[in-house]
Every structure is written in structure tokens, then in C-alpha cells.
Image (tube, grey):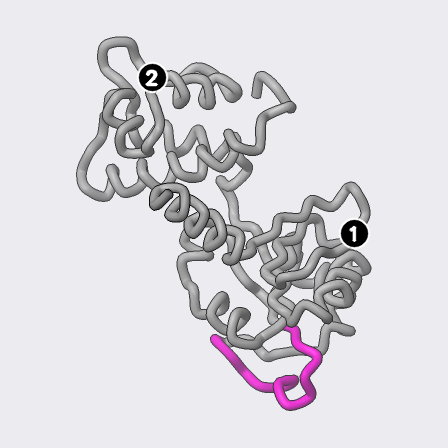
Amino acid sequence: MKSEHIPKATIGRLAVYIQVLENLLRDGNEVISSEKLARACSVNSSQIRKDLAYFGEFGVRGVGYYVQELITSIKLSLGIDRVWKCALIGVGNMGSALLRHHDFEKRGFKICAAFDCDPDKIGLEFEGMEIVCPTHLKEQAPELNLEIGLIATPPDRAQRAANHLVDANIKGIINFAPSRINVPKHIPVEYVDFFDHLYAVAFQITLGTD
């Protein structure tokens, strides 16, 4: 990797590149030009070259990119060339949907443990996992080698869930709850708020109707 200071937007685009490249490979495309890849990803070819340049040299002049080779290289650069084991806190509507979303494992992220503080849910089995009280997360995390935490609780319980994850030495957190959390600076946090995207789309539609 040429630089540790890679823009967050670049990381986001690399995730799109992987998805597009995997679809291309599934359709039997072994080689693709930078122009065609750019169109498929809704960016320009210079942007793709700039993004990939953070990680090394890719592509063959006059030929393009070898699809499988590029997928492998991007996954290696992003650290998703292995399985990351995840813990889910909150088995409500959102949490249940995440547990049923089997594409997580296909993309290298396996939810290995589910936690909820609701006494009516503790002990139940869901998607092959027993729902456990979050107070047991600290002891289960090292046993299951859990590294990433997913928070899908109501907003008023998100911070408590984050505290359990921090105490269990979880390395990173994805927060689906519509609430901000406080964690130590060394733990990366990403927020997934669908309303952000709804607001953005509504705003763009509004601009277009002015």
C-alpha cells in the first residue's frame, strides 16, 4: 500500500468496484477496459486509476484489467481477503433482518453471535444461534474470535450496547441504531442511517422540481 492516508470516499468506491467486478466475473467477463469498468461503476476512468493507485499498479495498457486479479488485489488491500467474525447486539426487526441476510458471509463477514437484553428473547434460537444476554459478550468474544460489533438496538440502548462491545475488546463497530455513540478513539465506528439517504434523495428531487 502506497499511503495510509486514503480518503474515505475512495474506500467507499472500492466497495462498489468489487461488487461490479464480481458481477462481471459471474457473467463470464475475464478482462474489462477501464472505460467500461468506469461506466459500470458510474465514475470516470481517471477516478478508478486514481483510487487504485493508492494500492499499487493495476491493469495492462491496451488490454485493461483482469477481473479476478483485480478483485483479489482490492480485497487484499481492504483486508477482506479473510472472514471477519461479528457480534450482533439487538435482535429486533433490524437485527433479525441482518441475521437473515446471508450475503454477509459471502462477502467475508460472518455473524457468529447474537445478543439481546430482552428476557423474552434470551435463550431462543434464531438462524442457528442462541440469543444471549449482552453481559456475556465479554467472555464469548475471545472464545469466538469476535472482532466487529453490529448495533441494531433502539436508539436509547445503543450506547449501552457500545459499552459492552468496548469491554469485550471489539475492534470496530457498525451502528444501525439512529443514535450517536461514544467509544475510544482507537475503535472505528461507521453509522448506517437510512434516513440520511432518504433526506439526500428528497433534497435532490426537490432541487429538480424548482
Which quarter of the picture shows residue 95?
A: bottom right
Kind of residue at badge 1: Val
Q: Could you tell me which secondary element the residue under label 2 belongs to?
A: loop
Pointer 1: what residue?
183
Going 64% across and 90% down the picture, which residue do you hit?
120
Going 62% across and 62% down the picture, which residue do you hit?
178
Was residue 125 drawn as part of the magenta stretch in this picture?
Answer: yes
Instruction: Measuring from the top left, give residue 34's x and y in whole percent.
Output: 29, 20
Was residue 192 drawn as part of the magenta stretch in this picture?
Answer: no
Q: Could you tell me which secondary element the residue under label 1 belongs to?
A: loop
* Structural distance between the alpha carbons of marks 1 and 2: 40 Å
Instruction: Measuring from the top left, give residue 79's x and y in whole percent.
Output: 55, 37
Which quarter of the picture shows residue 143?
A: bottom right
Instruction: Measuring from the top left, give residue 148's x and y in whole percent.
Output: 64, 54
Going 68% across and 84% down the picture, which residue do you hit?
118
Q: Pick the quarter of the image with the C terminus.
A: top left
Pointer 2: what residue?
59
| Image: 192 above or below 80 | below
Residue sitting at the far left: 28
Kind of residue at badge 2: Gly
Residues under numbered marks 1 and 2 in contact, where contact means CB atoms less than 8 Å apart: no
- Disc assigned to residue 161: none
